[in-house]
Image (cartoon, rainbow, N blue to C red):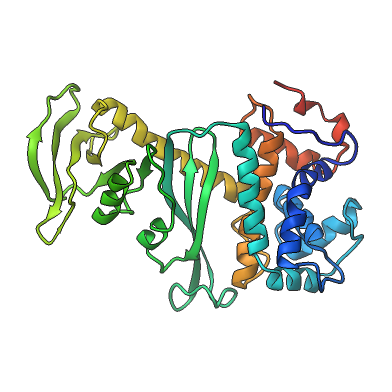
Amino acid sequence: MYKKHTPSCGSLLKVLVHQSDTILLPIIQKHHSDKWSKKLSTRDQLEILVSAHLAQAKSLGDITEMIKGTGKFSCSSINKSSLSRVNRYRDFHIFEQLYHTLLKQVRKRIPYSSLRVIDSTSEVVSQNLFPLWPYDRSHSAIKVTVLFDPYYELPDKIVVSTRKVGDMQSAYKLPIKRGITYLIDGGFRDYDLYDKYIDHHAYFITRQHRVAKFQVTEDLPLTQPDVISDQIGLLGVTHNRMKNKTRLIRLWDDSGKEMLLSTNRFDLPTETIRELYRKRWDIEVFFKFLKQNLKLKKFFGSSKNAVKTQIYCALIAYLLAYLLKPKTTKMYEFIRKIHYALFLNFSKLTFFNTS
């Protein structure tokens, strides 16, 4: 379902990177990214960073040893300083554009679902190593906010920032589409944002604090024994209140604690709203998958450009694998197989033939 025509010979790495060749060239020409390159072209850099993620390289030293040891790259060897320099200075927007173009290619093969999850993850590192990403006196932190499709395991949009940037600042940069239901983490609590979703004819389901102020205008009938109340009204107080009516459901969660869910889905029963909100946890699985399988816990450079380049190349590696993944294979299982088969002959790999 997700496969496209790829050459039957060469290593799995070559087959993966081959998928991006036709769309990478116009981007290179647009940014003139190879004009002054002497050792590493943009394609070489992409090939190296994609393989570094899939092979779980831990450092620039690991990457240079991988290049020399496998003999599968366009350059036979490169030193750490040269690789570090190109990651620092070649504009990350090249890889950002490639990521979005690849995502469009993936979306041509699969439909859009009606759900999106919004959440963020961050990594805390030493400020001595990352002085441009301040968090406190001794630490720096990098935050990645993601708009995620839980049904097809696809990140539709990301925003990279420091941890000091509020969740809401990142949330306002994410697109809103008509008819989509957004499952929002409780940390993104903002009444103006909820009104914005309603004004764009979109839906939201989010968790509220137990002491949230709510002016009740209508009580709905209760259909589930674990639902305490189901009401329609206005969230907030006089000086900070939503302009549109919402639904507030007070119920018991799986651990026996009281939970409040607010939404503008007036058409759905409470049990369906609860199940939809549970889908929000899929993005936590995705974050864990990225950190464990695509090496986003250690960075190959300390500059903002190098970090963003690495993040986008990790997502590019994810999409390239997604394009090859057989329909019924779980993504984490497929990536695990790629770890062991990255430099092997593609034509002899049998796990691509499973339906």
Q: Residue at x 80, y 42 (%)?
A: 342
Look at the picture and state if 240 lies above or below 271: below
Residue 254, percent from left and from top: 29, 32
Please give left or right for residue 258 compared with residue 320 in the image.
left
Look at the picture and state if 206 lies above or below 67: above
Residue 324, percent from left and from top: 72, 35
Please give left or right for residue 178 compared with residue 132 in the image.
left
Front in this rendered view, residue 91 or 179: 179
In terms of image quadrants, where is residue 271? top left
Residue 222 in sight in this render: yes
Q: Residue at x 59, y 48 (%)?
A: 290
Residue 103, percent from left and from top: 61, 44
Q: Quadrant where the C terminus lies?
A: top right
Look at the picture and state if 51 lies above or below 320: below
Please give left or right for residue 236 compared with residue 200 in the image.
left
Residue 294 in sight in this render: no
In terms of image quadrants, where is residue 347? top right
Residue 340, percent from left and from top: 77, 40
